C-alpha cells in the first residue's frame, strides 16, 4: 500500500492509499493492519487524490456508481439521525407522523446496510430494492437465530477469530511505507 492520508472517521483511525495488489484506492481501518514497515522505495502521490471522497460514510467502494438511498426513520431514531451529518449528499425531511425521511446518493450498499440494521425496527428502507432485499434477508436470518431452542449449543459452536494488534518498529513517512492487511 502507498499510504496517502490518515483520517479519523466512523469513530476510528483509517489509512487511505493506493493498493498495488488490487490497483485501486482503499481505506483500511488501522485495527485491521497486521504489520507494517518502512521500505527503501518511494512512490508519487496521485495529484487527483481527494481525501473528501474517503471522509464520508458509505463511499468506501468508489468503483461503484452512486445510488439514491431512501430510508424512513421512526421515533426515537428519527431525532438521532437528524442530529448528525452522515453523508455530504444527505437530505432529510420530517414527516407529519414524526418519522424522518433520509435521502443520500451513496456508493456501496454494504456499509449503509450495517448502519440501517443498527436501527432495527426504527428504520425502513424505501429505495433501492436491492438494499430492501438485503435488509429483509438479514432480519429474517437474525429472527431465525432466536427461534433455535438450544442457544447454548449455538454459542459453543461459534468460533471467534482475533487478529493480532499492529506492530510498528520504525517511523513511517508519507512517501515510504508498506502495509500488510
Image (spheres, rainbow, N blue to C red):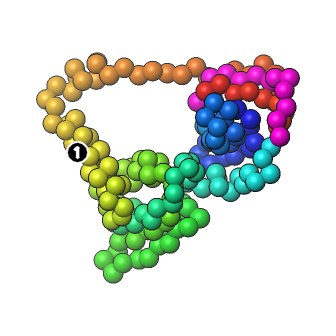
Q: Where residue 39 sits in the image (x, y, percent)? A: 81, 23
Quarter of the figure with residue 34: top right
Where's residue 74, x and y in %? Answer: 34, 66
Q: Is residue 38 left or right of residue 79?
A: right
The percent coordinates of residue 165 (x first, y second) are 61, 22
Asked if residue 128 lies left or right of residue 62, the reply is left
Picture quadrant of residue 20? top right
Depth check: 79 or 56 in front?
56
Task: Indicate left or right for 142 with 173 as reference.
Answer: left
Depth check: give the residue in front, 54 or 62: 62
- Left or right position of 157 against 94: left
Task: Give the extent of the magenta segment.
Answer: 31-44
Residue 21 magenta: no
Residue sitting at 56 percent across and 67 percent down? 89
Name the spot of residue 154 as percent of width and height, x first.
24, 24
Residue at x 69% of width, y 27% of height: 179
Residue 171 visible, this orientation: no
Which residue shows up at 66% across the image and 35% down it? 19
Quarter of the figure that contains the N terminus:
top right
Q: Secondary structure at mark 1?
A: helix
Magenta includes 38? yes
Residue 121 vertical position relative to residue 103 in the rendered view, above or below: above
Quadrant containing the C terminus is top right
Residue 26 appears in the picture as rendered: yes
Q: Which residue is mark 1?
A: 140
Amino acid at each position: 500500500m502507498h499510504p496517502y492520508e490518515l483520517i479519523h472517521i466512523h469513530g476510528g483511525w483509517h489509512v487511505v492509499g493506493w493498493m498495488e495488489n488490487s490497483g485501486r484506492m482503499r481505506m483500511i481501518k488501522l485495527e485491521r493492519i497486521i504489520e507494517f514497515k518502512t521500505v527503501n522505495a518511494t512512490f508519487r502521490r496521485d495529484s487527483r487524490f481527494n481525501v473528501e471522497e474517503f471522509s464520508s460514510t458509505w463511499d468506501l467502494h468508489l468503483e461503484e456508481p452512486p445510488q439514491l438511498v431512501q430510508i424512513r426513520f421512526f421515533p426515537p431514531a428519527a431525532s438521532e439521525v437528524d442530529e448528525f451529518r452522515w453523508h455530504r449528499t444527505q437530505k432529510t425531511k420530517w414527516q407529519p407522523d414524526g418519522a424522518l425521511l433520509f435521502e443520500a446518493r451513496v456508493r456501496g450498499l454494504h456499509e449503509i446496510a450495517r448502519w440501517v440494521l443498527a436501527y432495527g425496527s426504527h428504520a425502513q428502507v424505501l429505495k433501492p430494492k436491492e438494499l430492501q432485499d438485503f435488509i429483509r434477508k438479514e432480519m429474517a436470518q437474525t429472527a431465525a437465530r432466536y427461534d433455535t431452542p438450544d442457544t447454548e449449543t449455538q454459542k459453543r459452536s461459534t468460533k471467534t477469530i482475533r487478529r493480532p494488534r499492529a506492530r510498528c518498529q520504525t517511523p513511517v513517512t508519507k512517501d515510504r511505507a508498506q502495509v500488510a492487511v
